Amino acid sequence: MGNIGVLELVIVIMAAVAVIGAYFLAIRKIINSKMTSNQKIVWILAIFFFHLLGLVIFLIYHDIYLSPELRGELR
């Protein structure tokens, strides 16, 4: 007890990569969207101040509630 095994380390690394990937996806969606500059700044601040909760709320808002004209293209 107390030792970290290889499997636990792999799980932690995979979770960290998933969260970091979600942050990059959200920032890319914010930058490429056609929202106003003020909206972009508010969403970036919300993501960084509220971490995972802000990230999840933004991704749900962007993909479900934001009109398709404002979403922009991801390349």
Image: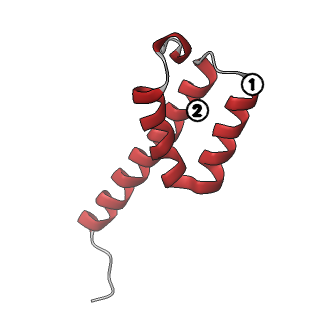
The residue depicted at 48 percent of the width and 44 percent of the height is: 57
The residue depicted at 43 percent of the width and 53 percent of the height is: 16
The residue depicted at 30 percent of the width and 59 percent of the height is: 11
Mark 2 vs mark 1, CA separation in Å:
13 Å
Instruction: Work out which quarter of the rendered image holds the N terminus and state it.
Output: bottom left
Tell me where residue 59 appears, x and y as whole percent: 45, 36
The foreground one among 45 and 28 is: 45
Tell me where residue 2 appears, x and y as whole percent: 33, 87
Label 1 packing within 10 angstroms: few (<14), some (14-19), many (20+)? few
- Which comes sooner in the sequence, label 2 or label 1? 2
Q: Is residue 66 above or below residue 48?
A: above
The amino acid type found where label 2 is placed reads: Ile
Residue at the spot of label 2 = 27
Q: Quadrant of residue 42?
A: top right
Q: Quadrant of residue 8?
A: bottom left
The foreground one among 37 and 67 is: 67
Q: What kind of element bears circle 2? A: helix
The foreground one among 30 and 1 is: 30
